[in-house]
Amino acid sequence: MKILLISIWTNLNNRENKYEIINERGEETEREVVESKPSLAEVKFLRESEEQVDMLVLLPSFLSAYLKTQDLPDSYVELKKRIQEEVLKRFQGIDVEVIPSSGTIDADGFMHIHDNSLGNFNFSVYYSVYNALTRYNPDTVLLDLSETTSYLTYYTSDAAKLAIQDYYITKRKADIPLIEFSTDFANKIITLKKSTIRNVDISDYLTSQEIKLAKGMPTLSKSELFAIGRALQLGFPLALLYLLNGIEELTKPEDFMQKIEESITVSKKEQEKEYLVSSGVRAYNTAPYYFMGYHFIEAYKVKSETGEYTLDDLLKLIDVYLSLIHI
């Protein structure tokens, strides 16, 4: 079984603890594993069980507080690189992605103030998780929420679930178990929720009236995405075939991610003892819906120079309708 374990770390403490472990089905075991983080303990246990396990660690940008004050970078590109290097210096065998985040941390009297909007955090988690899913093609996903607090718990869980639904629709087309877990005060890993991603109805997302990218940024082909959603709801596969192949302008997810990161300004104020990281581009919470539509179009459009389509092209879309019937 191929497993992807996703974790979000809000600190870089590496003091070891003994953790009681769950298995790949979210069930309690009698095993205890000594590690510096519950997610690392889980990965160690699963790898010992001869499972193929990959790990993605999401790193909020406010982990800048763990860098040396005198060496704080003056650009977001360099800040991402430095946070990644600091983490990989302490922990091995993981993939890491820095996520634009919001929060204030006092690092020995020097305030790290990050103002990057919840929408940017939400989209960045979705984007990073979707890319990891397509890279590793897992059978099961485990989501570690043991270090999340306040907004991080809800947005990490919701964005990861959207990414898995997107991946299910456009890539895998097979049930994906999702196990969300945390720890109690006795360092026992506990399953918060078990769910199975199956038969996702993408039309609900495409017909959302709130689908937008970012403040001050046009949402290209929004009406066409809505039309695709309605064609799915009404059961018009032939209309859907032409709609999918008629869209010419769409924003790519990697371009949107780049716009967000390029808009982030970094400033260090020695006198005020402040390190400020702030985004100019602020994504809406519904931005992932747009890119679910983007991936759907990329997966099902047909390249036809003549504008004519075959019966096989139509049958491919009818399979999508048949999956919606069972929702």
Image (tube, rainbow, N blue to C red):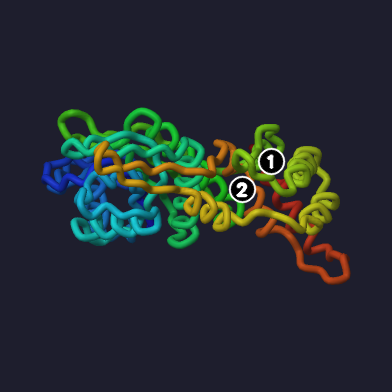
Q: Is residue 30 visible?
A: yes
Residue at left 12%, top 42%? Answer: 18
**Residue 201 appears at what percent x and percent y?**
65, 40
Residue type indicated by callout 1:
Leu
Number of dots carrying numbers? 2
User: From the image, which quarter does the C terminus lie in?
Assistant: top right
Which of the marked residues, 1 or 2, is nearer the chain's N terminus? 1
**Residue 248 appears at what percent x and percent y?**
76, 58
Q: Are marks 1 and 2 in contact (CB under 8 Å)?
A: yes
- SS under mark 1: helix
**Residue 291 appears at what percent x and percent y?**
61, 49
Q: Is residue 197 visible?
A: no
How many residues crowd around disc 2 within 10 Å: few (fewer than 14), some, or many (20 or more)?
A: many
Residue nearest the viewer, comparing 169 with 274: 274
Tag 2 residue: 292
Residue type indicated by callout 2:
Met
- SS under mark 2: helix
How many residues crowd around disc 1 within 10 Å: few (fewer than 14), some, or many (20 or more)?
A: many
**Disc on res. 206:** 1
